[in-house]
Image: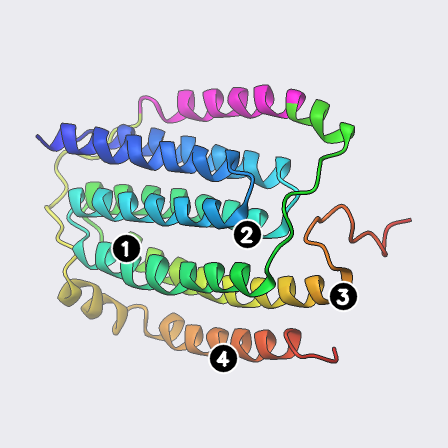
Amino acid sequence: MIPLNWYLILGAALFVLGMLGFFLKRNIIALLLSVEIMLNAVNLTFVAFSSRNGQISGQIFVFFVLVVAAAEAAVGLALVIAMFRNRETLNVDRSNLLKW
Amino acid sequence: MMELLFFVFAAIALGSAINVLVQRHVLYSSLSLILLLTAMSGLFVLMQAEFLAVINVIVYAGAIMVLFVFVIMLLNLPQDEDEEDRLRWLKLLGIPMGLFLMFMVIRTVWNVEGSAAAPQLSGTPQAIGASLFTDYLLPFELTSLLILIALMGAVVFAKKDL
């Protein structure tokens, strides 16, 4: 039986890695990929608590997280296409029209 | 045996997550993320969440990541532009702070223990479906609305003359 906190430690490490990527990368697709890493870390934590506490609700939640991730990827990538078509770049620092 | 499998999957997951961050081209990053999702499915199987493991491979690695790879190849990205100096020292500052945050979060969850007397749970499609279509029926129906809105949003955003 694997202790619960091993999963939590792995989930925490993955979440912080995703957050680091979100703050340090400048390519907008890399930012979306970092968000996916963070969602996966949360999924891992949900399933770990669900299986250790004997409640199925955590796994249902992972199901909903998957739905939200799919919707986010679809809309996000459509935005990426629109951005690339207008600005010819994916660097988020270059899309600063609304910046003072 | 279970512990060994856990360490193998955890090492693959952490290694591929770091690889996502250090790769210069996003195509290699997304391929590395597919490896991360596969390792995640292995961890789900270790926790008796079989249905989610299968769904993770089919929906996440199969559908969402294919969408990412498709868009990356569709856009035919130019090779990486050189970074400004501002980012260099931001990275020097950001990586130690991120590692410090990781240390603090790990220290928080270090001693968490699950309840020992909990019943054994098996995440079969039957168990998931029984809960999903009784207790969580309304959220389940609402997700269809969410996906419909996301679908229309994606079509509108990707239109030629926005």
Q: Which chain does the residue under circle 4 lie in?
A: B
Numbered disc 1: secondary structure? helix
Start-end of magenta stretch: B92-111
Tell me whether the residue at label 4 lies in contact with that at label 2, contact meaning CB atoms closer than 8 angstroms. no
Task: Give the foreground label among 2 and 1.
Answer: 2
Q: Earlier in the sequence, mark 1 or mark 3?
A: 1
Under mark 4, the amino acid is Leu
Mark 4 surroundings within 10 Å by alpha-carbon count, few (fewer than 14), some (14 through 19), many (20 or more):
few
Under mark 2, the amino acid is Leu
Residue A39: x percent and y percent? 44, 49
Which residue extends farthest right? A100
Residue B133 sits inside the magenta stretch: no
Task: Give the foreground label among 2 and 3.
Answer: 3
Discs 4 and 2 carry the same chain letter: no
Q: Which chain does the residue under circle 2 lie in?
A: A
Residue A42: x percent and y percent? 40, 45
The residue that appears at 77% across and 29% down in the rendered structure is B86
Q: In the rendered image, which residue does mark 2 sit on?
A: A32
Q: In the rendered image, which residue does mark 3 sit on?
A: A86
The residue that appears at 54% across and 73% down in the rendered structure is B150
The residue that appears at 26% across and 41% down in the rendered structure is A48
Q: Earlier in the sequence, mark 2 or mark 3?
A: 2
Discs 1 and 3 carry the same chain letter: yes
Residue A100 tag number: none
Question: Does residue B103 show up?
Answer: yes
Under mark 1, the amino acid is Gln
| CA distance for labels 1 and 3 | 41 Å
Numbered disc 2: secondary structure? helix
Task: Give the foreground label among 1 and 3.
Answer: 3
| CA distance for labels 2 and 3 | 19 Å
Q: Earlier in the sequence, mark 2 or mark 1?
A: 2
Q: In the rendered image, which residue does mark 1 sit on?
A: A59
